[in-house]
Every structure is written in structure tokens, then in C-alpha cells.
Image: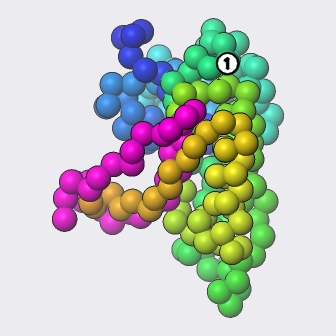
Amino acid sequence: MDHSAPSLVDLFCGVGGISLGFAQAGFRVLGGNDFDQHALEAFALNHPDAVTWPGNLEELKPETLLHDLELAPGELDVLAGGPPCQGFSRNRARRHLGGRFVDDPRNYLFKEFLRFVEYVRPRLVLIENVPEILIKHDGLFGREIIESLLEVGYETRTAVLNSIDFGVPQKRRRAFFLAGRGSPPSLPVPTHG
């Protein structure tokens, strides 16, 4: 592992798809957390040098994460994650009655992610979710994410990007929140049409 490469931790990591993209871009994947044991086992196979923390993120302490990685606050380059999207997704019709938002406790797990941002103080933050997170409940969730990041010193850019615009043979629209202490980097420009 190249210890001079920028570092990444992936929360709500699943099998490690976000981490794989970062690894392909030259990042060191230091660790991942997920409550799904089978997904976390696949993450570990995909990222054999990474530390894994099984279980609900609510039960993991950011102090434990930094201790296990031998990092201090502010030393991690990127904290990434895709909090659960089921409560926001259009594909879950039973969660939306007559077009109206229906509450789901998983909708609020982004707050657990933000708890880690505040303590870990990564240089950059990436949150990925379905586009509906930006509009559900009159935009409450998107606004809260942006305002919470701003309160702890992060400027945020948001966009809905489609994987097909970047050469992936699949239509997959996702909302991205890219935040940095000071100014975040620019969001990517589509490469395919």
C-alpha cells in the first residue's frame, strides 16, 4: 500500500463500491463500516488492507475509528458514505402515499455520518444518495446536511449526476454532496453524451 496516497474511510460502505472508485483513483482505503455482515465481508475481500467495523453506525464511536487507524482529527483525507436511501427512493412506493413523504427512521442516519465528520474533521466529505433526498419533505434533508456541514466549517457543492454521463453503461442518477474545509473541489464534468 502506498502510504503517501490520500486516505479514505467509507461509512455505510456496503460491498465497497464508493471505495473501489476512490481506490481506482489512487486513494488508500483505510476502513469501512456497515451493518450488513455479508456486505462487509465482501468489502473486506475488495479492500483487504482496510479495517472493518461491523454493526450499526450509531454504535461506533468516532474515537474508536481514529484510534484503530492511528489517526488524529484532521488527518483523514476523505470521509465518504451513502446513508440508507430506501426512505427517499421513488422505487419504494409504499413509503410514499399519494406522492407525499412517509417517515422512515433510516432517513435520519445521515446525522450519524455528520457526527463522524464533526469529530474526525476530514479534509473532504462525500455523501451519495438518491436524488429525492434533495426534494423530499420540501428539501428538509438536503438543507440540513448542507447547514450541518457549514456549521462545522465545510463549504458544500451538490449535484445530481448520472453515471451514463461518465461512461458507465447504466442510467443511475445520484445526488452528491461534496464538502471541503474552505472550498470543496469542483464536481466532475460529464465526459460522455
| Nearer the observer, 71 or 123 | 123
Horizontal side, residue 11 vs residue 49: left or right = right
156 is higher (above) or lower (below) than 34: below
118 is higher (above) or lower (below) than 106: above
Measuring 80% from the left and 34% from the top, which residue is drawn there? Answer: 59
- Residue 139 spot, x, y in % from top left: 66, 69
Question: Which segment did they paint magenta?
Answer: 166-193
Amino acid type of disc 1?
Pro
Residue ID for mark 1: 73
- Residue 73 spot, x, y in % from top left: 67, 18
How many marks are shown on the rendered structure?
Answer: 1
Measuring 58% from the left and 17% from the top, which residue is drawn there? Answer: 75
Q: Is residue 68 visible?
A: no
Question: Residue lying furthest bottom in this view?
Answer: 98
| Nearer the observer, 137 or 156 | 156
Q: Is residue 119 visible?
A: yes
Measuring 73% from the left and 42% from the top, which residue is drawn there? Answer: 151
| Nearer the observer, 146 or 191 | 146
| Nearer the observer, 120 or 67 | 120
Please say whether residue 63 is one of the residues in the magenta stretch. Answer: no
93 is higher (above) or lower (below) than 154: below
Quadrant assignment, res 11: top right
- Residue 24 spot, x, y in % from top left: 31, 31
Color style of the picture:
rainbow
From the image, give the main secondary structure of the stretch colored magenta: loop
Q: Residues within 10 Å of mark 1 (few under 14, many from 20)?
A: some
Measuring 57% from the left and 69% from the top, which residue is drawn there? Answer: 132
Q: Quadrant of the N terminus?
A: top left
- Residue 111 spot, x, y in % from top left: 74, 47
Please say whether residue 188 is one of the residues in the magenta stretch. Answer: yes
Give the structural element (helix, strand or loop) at label 1.
loop
Q: Quadrant of the C terminus?
A: bottom left
